[in-house]
Amino acid sequence: MCCLFGILDYGGKLSRKEKTKILSVLSVACEERGTDATGIAYNTGGALKVYKRPLPAHLLWFRIFEDTNLVMGHTRMTTQGSERFNANNHPFAGQAGSTNFALAHNGVLSNDKRLRRQYDLPATKIETDSYIAVQLLEASEELSFASLADMAEKLEGSFTITVMIDKDELYFIKGDNPMCIYHYEKLGFYIYASTKPILKSALKQLNLKLGKPTKVKLDCGEILKIDAEGRMSRFQFDDTNLFLGYTHWPRWPVQPECWKPATNDSYINDLKSIAAYYGIYEDEIDEMLADGVTPEEIEDLLNGA
């Protein structure tokens, strides 16, 4: 369980100081989904940069440049590949043809080693399962809706992926894992995090006068592109391989489609009873479930409460 987060200031109305503050608070809010490592990718001076360290977000100092409008971040809970070897941490840099990109992944992939053999991809010292997505995009020699869909359709397991390129374009490849995106249209600003509670918590702490946002709809099996002018476009991919070979959560049946757990009212009612002990109301649990947070993730949050 990791957290994806970031901002796109396409309107250019936020100061460097404001963007730095937003990212600092947002990344710390994301620590509830991972503290083993933190990283960001951003553009400055016409070049894409990646900064990551095997540290929790609250110990990392973000330096945002005046010309930086897009930042894509990740907080990591290690599942494969030690965070102490920094190359294992997200985001990962890559190049598809002439396009430089960075990629971050939330989830667990089960077929990374098989794909590397099947497509004769180069050996790598990076141990993280997520890196196979970078290699598939590099092998395609282009970064487009078609190449992103082809990559997503080859993956088996659990994922939501973000990709940014050096032209301030941001892609969301939505699998089964949650994602919440807010658009402040009047300000010309997007902000996102893996879950709505994390995003709302960060915004509450920031106490900035941003106005009322619009929540951007994003479905499983969909790729969303937001360009440097804030314009959105969409593409579909076949989500059949989601959860193939993935038996991480035995409570729910494995579905060869966008995963939706079987109804288990007793289990959810138990979660609500436990949540009440921590001062979390039933409607908050319902809201988290509606936003794509799984019952198991809610249980993990309560166990860490």
Image (tube, rainbow, N blue to C red):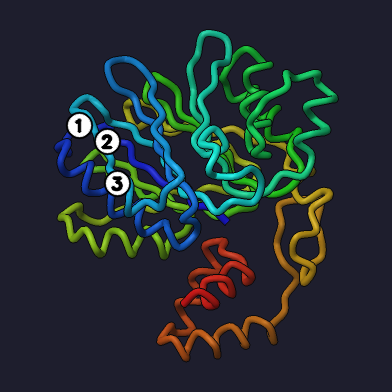
Residue type at mark 2: give it. Asp
User: Does residue 128 appear to the left or right of 197 in the view shown?
Assistant: right
Q: Position of residue 189 (x, y in %)?
A: 28, 41
Q: Mark 2, residues whose alpha carbon is within 10 Å: few (<14), some, or many (≥20)? A: many
Q: Residue furthest top?
A: 98
Q: Label 1: which residue?
A: 12
Q: Mark 1 to mark 2: distance in Å? A: 5 Å
Q: Mark 3 to mark 2: distance in Å? A: 12 Å
The image quadrant that residue 82 belongs to is top right
Whether residue 77 is visible? yes
Residue sitting nearer the eye, 183 or 34? 34
Q: Position of residue 102 (x, y in %)?
A: 49, 28
Whether residue 172 is visible? no
Q: Label 3: which residue?
A: 23
Q: What residue is shown at x 77% (from left), y 51% (from top)? A: 243
Residue sitting nearer the eye, 257 or 246? 246
Residue type at mark 3: give it. Leu
Element carrying mark 3: helix
* Above or below, comparing residue 74 to residue 259 in the picture: above
Element carrying mark 1: loop
Q: Mark 1, residues whose alpha carbon is within 10 Å: few (<14), some, or many (≥20)? A: some
Q: Earlier in the sequence, mark 3 or mark 1?
A: 1
The quadrant of the rendering that contains the N terminus is: bottom right
Q: Earlier in the sequence, mark 3 or mark 2?
A: 2
Element carrying mark 2: loop
Q: Position of residue 126 (x, y in %)?
A: 63, 31
Q: Label 2: which residue?
A: 9
